[in-house]
């Protein structure tokens, strides 16, 4: 599959490192991976792994900058026609979803929810439902919270980290994954989990 990972890469946080690790894992599985993001410390590492980089920054320039980036993103989508867009941050989802509807309607949008401000949940649930987005929560509680706020249960799953924590062998951890597997071939590293590993679900 052709997959575009879309996020901000300007920092050194969990989202940035998880995005690179996700791209590398999927690349090793034979997928064509594009990173659409701002520049940052980990972009070079991603490129060294064979991931193509498309500069786009949804976090600079206010509304005008957001719209400019949306048009640039749409031009890329028209050219690439990806199977999946994976969004690691909520801010980029509306731009990705709207651009895809116009120029690449067969593309599926997946958003990883790592936790939101309490007041944001109702807005995100309603907006992302209308946009036809799929969501992966970083835990069961996150999934259930979004469902309570109106997001369709049939378009949301949750997944914990697949790499085993210290002291747990991989085969044992893999059995645990099978009990909670979902139909999304993606993963994330929760921002708040200092010792969190990385996961890759294979639905």
Image: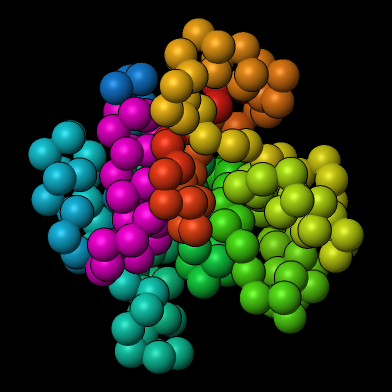
The quarter in which the N terminus is drawn is top left
The residue drawn where x is 34% and y is 29% is: 25
Residue farthest to the top, as pictured: 171
Quadrant housing residue 97: bottom right
The x and y percentages for residue 120 are 70, 76
The residue drawn where x is 63% and y is 69% is: 116
Query: Is 119 in front, or is 185?
Result: 119
The x and y percentages for residue 26 are 37, 29
The x and y percentages for residue 182 are 68, 28
Does the rendering let one see residue 27?
yes
Range of residues picked out in magenta: 1-27
The quarter in which the C terminus is drawn is top right
Query: Is 186 in front, or is 191?
Result: 191
Quick check: is 113 in the magenta stretch? Answer: no
Could you tell me how many numbered marks the image carries?
A: 0
Q: Is residue 115 above or below residue 43?
A: below
The x and y percentages for residue 46 are 20, 44
Q: Is residue 82 left or right of residue 38?
A: right
The residue drawn where x is 37% and y is 46% is: 18
Q: Is residue 168 left or right of residue 54?
A: right
Q: Is residue 102 left or right of residue 144?
A: left
Quick check: is 17 in the magenta stretch? Answer: yes
């Amino acid at each position: 599959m052709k997959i575009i990972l879309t996020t901000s890469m300007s920092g050194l946080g969990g989202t940035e490192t998880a995005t690179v690790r996700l791209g590398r894992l999927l690349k090793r599985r034979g997928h064509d991976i594009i990173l659409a993001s701002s520049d940052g410390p980990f972009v070079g590492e991603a490129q060294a792994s064979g991931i193509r980089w498309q500069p786009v920054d949804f976090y600079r320039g206010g509304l005008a900058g957001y719209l400019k980036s949306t048009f640039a993103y749409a031009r890329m989508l028209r050219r690439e026609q990806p199977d999946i867009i994976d969004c690691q941050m909520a801010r980029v989802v509306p731009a990705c979803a709207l651009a895809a509807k116009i120029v690449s309607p067969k593309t599926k949008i997946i958003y990883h929810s790592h936790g939101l401000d309490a007041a944001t949940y109702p807005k995100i649930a309603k907006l992302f439902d209308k946009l036809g987005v799929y969501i992966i929560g970083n835990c069961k509680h996150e999934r259930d919270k979004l469902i309570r706020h109106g997001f369709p249960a049939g378009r949301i799953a949750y997944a914990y980290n697949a790499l085993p924590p210290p002291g747990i062998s991989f085969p044992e951890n893999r059995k645990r994954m099978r009990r909670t597997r979902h139909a999304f071939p993606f993963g994330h590293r929760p921002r708040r989990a200092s010792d969190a590993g990385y996961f890759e679900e294979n639905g």
